[in-house]
Amino acid sequence: MRYIIAVISLWLLSTPAVFADTWGEMTWGEGVWGSPNEPVDCEHAVYSLKNKTLTVPYLEIPIVNFFSGQPTGKVELWTGSLKRLHGITNRFRLLSKTMVPITDGSSTDCPATYTHAGTLFIPYVDVPTGVVVGNSQFGDEVKTFETILIWEPLGKSFIVESVNPVD
């Protein structure tokens, strides 16, 4: 019992919001809590504490011209997940088997966007503020953040550049 209390206390002190203890490598903004500016038809990305995965329901990816290597101005809508790398709090690897094009005509007013330059902008990420101990999760409050990740080709992963509270 003391161990669980110590773990929870340590977590609460070191992890005020999202993606654990990377204070020096993230920009924490002021944000507007309870903002009425959220689009009407908006499905948020979700971070799972237990699985350490970030699930992005709608992701706009630019179509690139095969010959020039440049974006055509058109985009495709995809869905997929990223997994936080074990032992590293600010890097996520794309789970390629989860990446699927959305072909059923569904859409959203707030998709995540990926640029040809390697920037992944996710306007809304829901993050539970609890803690996972074993197979149990404690706490049920959810906070929402705007997140920017940058593709790092050598590490074949995305690096969290900024996390700002939005709602």
Image: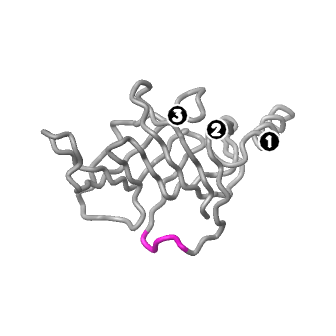
Mark 2 Cα within 10 Å, few/some/many (few <14, many 20+)?
A: few
Q: Quadrant of the N terminus?
A: top right
- Whether residue 58 is situated above or below residue 40 in the rendered picture: above
- Counting from the top left corner in percent of width and height, residue 66 is at 15, 40
Q: Magenta stretch: give its range.
A: 37-41
Q: Nearer the viewer, mark 3 or mark 2?
A: 3
Decide whether residue 39 is among the magenta residues. Answer: yes
Tell me the kind of residue under disc 1.
Leu
Badge 3 or badge 2: first in the primary sequence: 3
Q: Residue at x 40, y 36 (%)?
A: 94
Mark 3 Cα within 10 Å, few/some/many (few <14, many 20+)?
A: many
- Whether residue 13 is situated above or below residue 106 in the rendered picture: above
Badge 1 or badge 2: first in the primary sequence: 1
Tell me the kind of residue under disc 2.
Asn
Look at the numbered disc 3 and give the secondary structure of its residue.
strand
**Residue at image mark 2:** 135
Q: Residue at x 60, y 71 (%)?
A: 35
Q: Quadrant of residue 109?
A: bottom left
Q: Is residue 14 left or right of residue 109?
A: right
Q: Residue at x 72, y 47 (%)?
A: 16
**Residue at image mark 3:** 91
Q: Which mark, residue 13? A: 1
Badge 1 or badge 3: first in the primary sequence: 1
Mark 1 Cα within 10 Å, few/some/many (few <14, many 20+)?
A: few
